[in-house]
Amino acid sequence: MIAPQSINRSLERRRLLAKRSFTIDTGREKIEVEGHEHKKVAVKYMMKRRRSLLSTKDPAKVEKLFSDLPIEVKIIGKQLTKSYRVAWEKTGTGEFAGARFTFTIAEF
């Protein structure tokens, strides 16, 4: 027989790991996504934008995509909205020196 305490712990873990719905507002578009936390949702979105830059070969298209990158992003949850400022670099100067299209994200 399974102890009631272990059942409660497993239910609590599932509740903590459950994905929630968020809306990403970049100022130009709104995107419905699912995730665990506001910041993780923002980082995942930025990484997708970064990958599209890295996989593009045409220099003119890369410049256009880089100029269209969002600088401010709002992650809208059911009860809470958090805003993040994103600083993009073409070539990394910080922790990942030499990496292309790095970004830092900070809440404001």
Image (spheres, grey):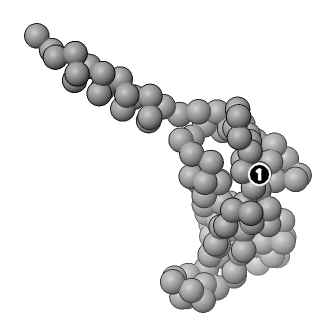
Q: Position of residue 12 (x, y in %)?
A: 37, 28
For mark 1, what is the residue? 74
Q: Position of residue 90 (x, y in %)?
A: 69, 82
Q: Is residue 57 left or right of residue 99?
A: right
User: Looking at this rendering, what residue extends furthest in the right direction?
Assistant: 28
Q: Quadrant of the N terminus?
A: top left
Count of marks placed on residues: 1
Q: Is residue 85 left or right of residue 100?
A: right
Q: Is residue 26 above or below residue 101?
A: above
Q: Is residue 84 above or below residue 4?
A: below
Q: Is residue 98 above or below residue 25?
A: below
Q: Quadrant of the C terminus?
A: bottom right
User: Looking at this rendering, what residue extends furthest in the left direction?
Assistant: 1
Category of crowding for the residue at label 1, using alpha-carbon neighbours closer than 10 angstroms: few (below 14), some (14–19), many (at least 20): many
Residue at 89% from the left image edge and 52% from the top image edge: 28
Residue at 57% from the left image edge and 40% from the top image edge: 35
Asked whether residue 65 is in view, the answer is no
Depth check, front residue: 3 or 25: 3
**Which picture quadrant has residue 39?**
bottom right
Depth check, front residue: 100 or 73: 73
Mark 1 element type: strand
Q: Is residue 102 above or below residue 38?
A: below
Depth check, front residue: 6 or 52: 6
Q: Position of residue 87 (x, y in %)?
A: 72, 74
Asked whether residue 40 is in view, the answer is yes
Residue at 44% from the left image edge and 28% from the top image edge: 15
Q: Amino acid at mark 1?
A: Lys
Q: Is residue 24 left or right of residue 98?
A: right
Q: Position of residue 75 (x, y in %)?
A: 72, 47
Depth check, front residue: 95 or 53: 95
Residue at 75% from the left image edge and 55% from the top image edge: 83
User: Looking at this rendering, what residue extends furthest in the front direction?
Assistant: 5
